[in-house]
Amino acid sequence: MGRMKIADVAESIDHELVSSSDIHDRIAEIARQVSEDHRGDDLLLVGVLKGAVNTMVAFSQALSIPVTMDFMSLSSYGSGTTSSGSVKVRQDLSTDVRGRHILVVEDIVDSGRTLAWLVDEFRRRGAASVEVFALLEKPARREVDVEVKYHGFDIPDEFVVGFGLDYDERFRNLDSIAVLKPSVYQGAHA
Ligand code: IMP
Ligand code: MG
C-alpha cells in the first residue's frame, strides 16, 4: 500500500533488476563513504533532472555532512531509448560554481556523453573539483571515458525504468529498478 511496485505495472515490466531495499542499502553505503571523504569540504551536490531526483533525495538524507544542493536539466534522450548525442541545457543551476567542490548525482551512465559534457562544463565554469556519483552504469554501452568515483550498480545493456528513470515520462515513481518489456517501446520510437 502507498507505493508503486512492479506488481502495479506488471503488464509493462519484464523483470526486476534491483530491489528497493538493495537500492537504499547501496546508496547508504556510498553516502557513508562520501561523508568520510568530504568532511569539512562544503560540498555542492548537483542533481541531473529529472532522473536523479529519487537518488538525490535518498542519498542526501543518508549523508552525515552538511551539503548544499542544486539541480540542472539537460536534454539527452527525448522520448526514445537511444542517445541523441548532443547535450542541451534546459534549465541551469542557480549556483555560481567557481571555486566549489561539486559532486554530480546521476541516475545512469549509458554512453557517458551527458556526464562527460557536464563535468567539462563545470571545469570551464571554474569549479575547484568535480566528482561523480551514478546510481547505475551500463559498461557495455560506454563510448566516452569519464571517471565515476562513486557508483551503485553495473547493469546489463537493457532499457530500465524506476527509481527516477523513465520511459516517455512514465515509471519514475516505481520503487525499484526494472527492465521494461521491449513491446512497450517497440514500434513507438526509433
Ligand atoms: P548517456 O549520455 O548516453 O550516458 O545517457 C545518459 C542519460 O540517458 C541518463 O541520464 C538517462 O536520463 C538516460 N538513460 C540512459 N539509459 C537509460 C535507461 O535504461 N532508462 C532510462 N533512461 C536512460
Ligand atoms: Mg539523467
Image: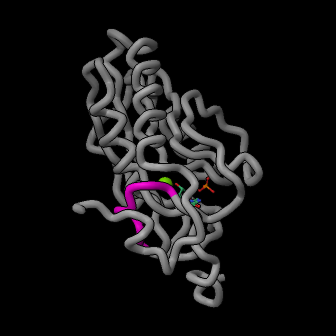
Q: Position of residue 82 (x, y in %)?
A: 65, 69
Q: Nearer the viewer, residue 66 or 128?
A: 66
Q: Position of residue 49 (x, y in %)?
A: 38, 54
**Vertical relation: 140 (above or below) 40:** below
Q: Is residue 130 left or right of residue 61?
A: right
Q: Is residue 36 magenta?
A: no
* Residue at the image position 24 percent from the left and 62 percent from the top: 1
Q: Residue visible at 48% across and 34% down? A: 26
Q: Name the main secondary structure of what is drawn in magenta.
A: loop
Left or right: 45, with 12 as reference point: left
Quadrant that contains the C terminus: bottom right
Q: Which one is in front, 56 or 97?
A: 56
x and y percentages locating residue 131 in the rendered image: 52, 28
- Start-end of magenta stretch: 169-177
Using the rendered view, name the quadrant where residue 176 is placed: bottom left
> Where is residue 54 drawn, in percent x and y?
35, 49
Hey, which residue is sitting farthest top in the picture?
40
Residue at the location (34% across, 29% down)? 44
Q: Which residue does the image show at 64% across and 85% down from the upper left? A: 186
